[in-house]
Amino acid sequence: MPLPALRADGTLPPGVHSASLEEVFAHFPATTAQRQALDAALSSCVVVAKRLRLADKMALDGSYITDKQQPSDVDVIVFDARCVSTHWRAAICC
């Protein structure tokens, strides 16, 4: 299921939204050097987490998953199979 459209305030609607990393990059395009750098860092994080088998799922949160052209960082939460379900205001699970 594709990511929902952003609300008028530039944020995702409340809820947990599943997406591949490619879908995240398409929904939040790297139109600035800051976003390009964060995309590269996020890609590296995902590669390392998968290679080391650290995560079954990862959640993204914060200004990175908004329409901000210059988000300050990307918030990444790493989940494993033993993790208890958590309620998020708005997050993307990859």
Image (cartoon, rainbow, N blue to C red):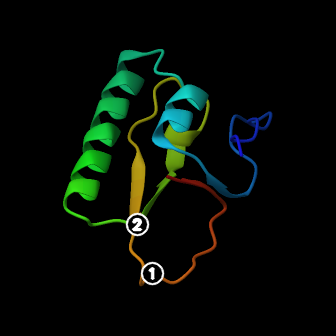
Q: Residue at x 62, y 66 (%)?
A: 88
Q: Is residue 28 above or below residue 82?
A: above
Q: Residue at x 50, y 30 (%)?
A: 25
Tag shown at residue 56: 2
Query: Which circle marks residue 83 in the picture?
Result: 1
Say if mark 2 contacts mark 1, CB within 8 Å.
yes
Q: Nearer the viewer, residue 46 or 38?
A: 46
Question: Residue reaching furthest right?
Answer: 8
Q: Residues within 10 Å of mark 1 (few under 14, many from 20)?
A: few
Q: Is residue 4 above or below residue 17?
A: above
Give the mark nearer the N terminus: 2 vs 1: 2
Would you identify the image quadrant in which residue 52 lies? bottom left
Q: Nearer the viewer, mark 2 or mark 1?
A: 2
Name the amino acid, label 1.
Cys
Tell me the kind of residue under disc 2: Asp
Q: Position of residue 24 (x, y in %)?
A: 53, 37
SS label for mark 2: loop
Q: Tell me which residue sits at (30%, 31%) in the image.
A: 40
Q: Is residue 76 above or below residue 32?
A: below
